[in-house]
Image (cartoon, rainbow, N blue to C red):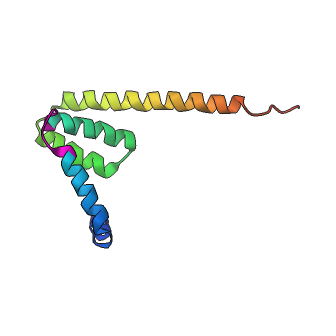
Amino acid sequence: MDAIGELGASAPATLAGFEALDGAAAKDGVLDAKTRELIALAVAVTTRCDGCIAVHSAAAARAGASKEEVAAALSVAIALNAGAAMVYSARAFDAFGQQPTSAG
């Protein structure tokens, strides 16, 4: 994305901070690269980041993720989004219940 490069040129400390954070998360350790990319892909879906989906789909493929593994990770994202909708729906229902009723 050209705009990211332009933003980085205008705010180099911000870009450097992002790159440091991204690099730290990408280091091998407890999780292997494929697992990290599957998590990143699921998170990208839940945060609705098109660029992240593109980057982490490609990285998951390069890390050897199978179609079935990607589908399993995306199933978790789907369940999480449904769970979040349930929690926020309960909050909305509660907020609605705190409103005065109309005396009609």
Residue that appears at 22% across and 55% down: 20
Viewer-closest of 3 and 30: 30
Q: Is residue 27 left or right of residue 77?
A: left
Q: Quadrant of residue 1?
A: bottom left
Residue that appears at 38% across and 43% down: 47
Residue 67 locus on image (x, y percent): 19, 31
Magenta portion: prevailing SS class: loop
Viewer-closest of 100 and 73: 100
Q: How many marks?
A: 0
Residue 38 locus on image (x, y percent): 23, 35
Residue that appears at 23% across and 56% down: 19
Q: Quadrant of residue 39?
A: top left
Q: Is residue 58 visible?
A: no
Viewer-closest of 99 and 19: 19
Residue 74 locus on image (x, y percent): 30, 32
Segment colored magenta: 25-33
On-image quarter of the C terminus: top right
Q: Is residue 25 left or right of residue 98?
A: left
Q: Quadrant of residue 29?
A: top left
Residue 98 belongs to magenta span? no
Q: Is residue 11 above or below residue 47?
A: below
Q: Is residue 7 above or below residue 29?
A: below
Residue 26 belongs to magenta span? yes
Residue 7 locus on image (x, y percent): 32, 68
Residue that appears at 30% across and 36% down: 42
Q: Is residue 54 above or below residue 79?
A: below
Q: Is residue 70 visible?
A: yes
Considering every residue shown, the one lying at the far bottom of the view is 10
Q: Is residue 68 above or below residue 1?
A: above
